[in-house]
């Protein structure tokens, strides 16, 4: 059986690429199709595959500006020749799920989420604050057309596997399709406790973009009088630094995996102030034995056990988070219990469950749809 993997783009090793890495191990002979590939930015396991980028690869300054070519993604993804593929496994949050397979081929999509910026996150990505009033007005019909295309191509997939029950609900709402749920892999062998007592700071590990709501955490930490360290970079950094000018907040920029692990291990708690589809960071933190303070929405409801492995905050306000931060003083969380919970999201568990999904998809009678 000839297999092909499809991934939106290969420009770094984030949560989606950790998923792809395991899929590459499960299908070691598969070609790997992607809109954009930046050599040197992915793991050796991924790079060892025959990688076939799309025509987007040949556009100017693509390694830095590939997101600016978003309106071209539908055309580009549909140009891939998959006539020889019996099995297609896509890992998609944008366009990968829309590849055109030959009749009789099986297509399993591991779906991170239906395209957020085309559906319910337009203002965060393309609103007046990001593009100005005229830019936002120009972007709106483009994104509306992209949303229609996203819905219209949902039927090209035989089986959807969602990263969380929260995302399964989005797939049902936007694609009118059912989906199984397999939680993404977390490297619980790498992220482990080191036995130290927490150093008293709060920690955020995140891209600095509006929908992550880092501003809430900055304001709440200031109210609670607790130091906050922020790992990551992005277009919101300058705005957040101005907001935190008189606050005990450190912006550490990008850090290595080893440095992030060390920061997890020393944190009083790790903070997730925004609504996430799943959220790898809270599970990595729990694998290091540290509790999480998270907004009680989205994937956090599936990864954080309120009062056991962290604190869930009902409202996305600075006062609500400040109250949660204050409750951490003098509160004891059992590191072993937190760690055991994180181990249920291990890499080995993900590989085993995805192998079962792939085998079931291949062995099902022709024409089976889930």
Image (spheres, helix red, strand yellow):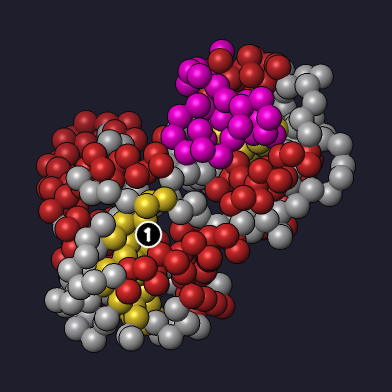
Q: Is residue 172 above or below residue 96?
A: above
Which residue corresponds to the image point at 47% horizontal and 38% vertical from the top-left?
Answer: 299
Q: Secondary structure at mark 1?
A: strand
Q: To which quarter of the image does residue 159 belong?
A: bottom left
Asked whether residue 293 is drawn in magenta, I would say: yes
Residue 76 x, y percent position in the rendering:
20, 69
Q: Answer yes or no: is residue 285 visible.
A: no
The quadrant of the picture occupied by the C terminus is: bottom left
Residue 90 x, y percent position in the rendering:
34, 66
Residue 227 x, y percent position in the rendering:
72, 27
Numbered range of the magenta stretch: 291-319
Which residue corresponds to the image point at 78% horizontal and 34% vertical from the top-left?
Answer: 334
- The residue nearer to you, when weighing 364 against 19, is 364
Q: To which quarter of the image does residue 228 belong?
A: top right
Which residue corresponds to the image point at 40% horizontal and 64% vertical from the top-left?
Answer: 357
Count every numbered label the image shows and give the total: 1
Q: Is residue 321 above or below residue 187?
A: above
Q: In this image, 136 relative to 316: left or right?
A: left
- The residue nearer to you, when weighing 218 against 116, is 116
**Which residue of the protein is positioned furthest toward the right in this rendering?**
196
Q: In this image, 223 relative to 330: left or right?
A: left
Q: Answer yes or no: is residue 296 visible.
A: yes
Q: Residues within 10 Å of mark 1 (few under 14, many from 20)?
A: many
Q: In this image, 278 relative to 195: left or right?
A: left
Which residue corresponds to the image point at 49% horizontal and 51% vertical from the top-left?
Answer: 183
**Which residue of the protein is positioned furthest toward the front in this rendering?**
365
Q: Is residue 22 above or below residue 202?
A: below
Q: In this image, 190 relative to 112: left or right?
A: right
The quadrant of the picture occupied by the N terminus is: bottom left
Q: Which residue is mark 1?
A: 110
- The residue nearer to you, when weighing 34 against 195, is 195
């Amino acid at each position: 059986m000839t297999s092909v993997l499809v991934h939106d783009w290969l420009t770094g090793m984030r949560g989606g690429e950790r998923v792809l890495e395991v899929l590459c191990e499960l299908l070691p002979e598969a070609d790997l199709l992607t809109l954009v590939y930046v050599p040197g930015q992915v793991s050796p396991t991924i790079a060892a595959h025959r990688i076939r980028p799309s025509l987007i690869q040949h556009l100017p300054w693509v390694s830095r500006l590939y997101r600016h070519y978003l309106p071209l993604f539908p055309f580009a993804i549909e140009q891939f020749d998959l006539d020889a593929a019996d099995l297609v496994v896509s890992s998609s949050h944008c366009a990968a799920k829309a590849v055109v397979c030959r009749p009789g081929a099986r297509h399993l999509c591991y779906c991170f989420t239906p395209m957020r910026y085309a559906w319910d996150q337009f203002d965060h990505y393309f609103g007046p604050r990001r593009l100005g009033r005229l830019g936002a007005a120009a972007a709106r019909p483009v994104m509306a057309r992209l949303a229609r295309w996203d819905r219209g191509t949902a039927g090209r997939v035989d089986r959807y596997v969602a990263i969380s029950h929260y995302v399964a609900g989005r797939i049902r709402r936007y694609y009118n399709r059912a989906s199984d749920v397999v939680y993404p892999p977390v490297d619980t062998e790498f992220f482990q406790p080191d036995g130290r007592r927490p150093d008293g700071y709060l920690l955020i590990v995140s891209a600095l973009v509006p929908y992550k709501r880092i501003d809430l955490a900055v304001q709440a930490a200031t109210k609670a009088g607790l130091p906050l360290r922020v790992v990551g970079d992005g277009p919101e950094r300058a705005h957040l630094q101005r907001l935190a000018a008189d606050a005990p907040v450190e912006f550490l920029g990008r850090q290595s995996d080893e440095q992030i692990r060390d920061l997890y291990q020393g944190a009083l708690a790790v903070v997730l102030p925004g609504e996430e589809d799943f959220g790898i960071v809270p599970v990595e933190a729990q694998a290091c034995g540290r509790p999480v303070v998270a907004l009680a929405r989205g994937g956090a409801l599936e990864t954080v056990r309120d009062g056991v492995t962290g604190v869930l905050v009902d409202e996305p306000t600075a006062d609500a988070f400040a109250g949660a931060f204050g409750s951490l003083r003098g509160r004891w969380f059992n590191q072993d219990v937190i760690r055991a919970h994180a181990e249920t999201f291990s890499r080995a568990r993900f590989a085993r469950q995805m192998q079962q999904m792939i085998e079931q998809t291949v062995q099902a009678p022709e024409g089976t749809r889930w």
